[in-house]
Image (tube, rainbow, N blue to C red):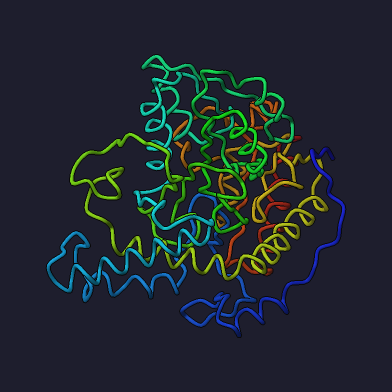
Amino acid sequence: MACVCNLAGSVPKVEDELESGRRRGKVKIQAEDGKSPNSVHTPIYLDNHATTPVDPRVLEEMLPYFREKFGNPASRNHSFGWNAGKAVEKAREQVAKLIGANVKEVVFTSGATESDNLAIKGVAHARNDKGDHIITAVTEHRAVLDSCKRLEQEGFRVTYLPVRKDGLVDLEDLRRAINDKTVLVTIMAANNEIGVLHPWGEIGKLCHKSGVIFHTDAAQATGKVPLDVVKDDVDLVSISGHKMYGPKGIGALYVRDGIRVEPNIDGGGHEHGMRSGTLNVPGIVGLGKACEIAQEEMTAEPKRISALRDRLRDRILQGVDEVHINGSLEHRLAGNLNISFENVDGESLMLGLSDIAVSSSSACRTASLQASHVLRSLGVSDDLAHSTIRFGVGRFNTEAEIDYAAGKVIEVVSSLRELSRV
């Protein structure tokens, strides 16, 4: 058995914490049909990096803004508009509080992809009189990489930093790459495929010391790990609602006061002129509530989820050999487990796990037959990359589901290997 990580350690029990969370109303695992959280009902959802279910508390907060409180916050002459405006500002406060920002620094968007585009292109265009050089990493989300590729077509120069075998950027590589024409560094907080957490605080300090603006795509990290934009010297942060138990189609961009960003969308001058368009009030309310819940549960939830992730990891490793875990486990999102299985056909593996919702790669690149660019950047072969599964454990998963998933993986991998020997 080969592994790119330290796999030592026991699996803690979490039943008592789950029960305590249910009593407090903070962990709602029981299904609406009354089924027990200790039973397993397929399909099981373990793809929480692709998207998360909307938390019932978030949905409850949103519902009035589809009907009774349906006003447009830009309507300043009546109570419908006033009430919508108040809801938007409350949500802005909730988002700002989660990341340690000022409310005036939060810009609502349609999601992290738009936020990435606005941050990267907006800063590059606003600062092209100061320089034409941008730095990013080879393992970034396509929203970042493709934005950089677009800017290259316009004449900007982009440095794509490699990563170490554990998936992390080497700070010395970044230090050497910065020059007097560098206007922006964009490196994600948490990788969407292998879950590794880059040292954004150290990156931010390095950038500020060099007079360079620092943007981080924190779609996967926001609400799951502490992020303080002041303490960490981060200038722009991309946030996504549906990655943190909020609705799809809503996100935010934190823009540090004083940073000039050229808008991608022109219109009525909404959101401080950075993002025109009628505001998605129900979505904004849902994002705000999701941020509030995440802040309240920031201490307990990652512990519970990491215990489930480690339980899944250990059971799989005990049941099958020739397994590789991709990326650092020391610096990693609590719910992420990215595993490659030797001598297994990837397509057959996914078909065998049809009652478990997992991903063979990022959900944003499933239309591609190419091996994951993230795994290839770590030195994983194409064959091994195609037999890789990304598990995303989340808020509503149970031990019973984890045990079922581990057992099914062991059964399918063992069966496929046996068949290949025939």
* Residue furthest left in the image: 77
Residue that appears at 25% across and 68% down: 84
Residue that appears at 73% across and 52% down: 410
* Residue furthest bottom in the image: 23
The C terminus, quarter of image: top right
Q: Is 88 left, or right, of 44 in this rendering?
A: left
Q: Is 165 left, or right, of 240 in this rendering?
A: right
Q: Nearer the viewer, residue 192 or 324?
A: 192
The N terminus, quarter of image: top right
Residue that appears at 70% across and 30% down: 171
* Residue furthest top in the image: 155
As drawn, 386 above or below 11: above
Q: Nearer the viewer, residue 97 or 306?
A: 97
Q: How many marks?
A: 0
Q: Nearer the viewer, residue 77 or 162?
A: 77
Q: Residue 244: image x %, image y %?
A: 50, 59
Q: Quadrant of residue 289?
A: bottom left
Q: Residue 49: image x %, image y %?
A: 54, 51
Q: Residue 190: image x %, image y %?
A: 60, 44
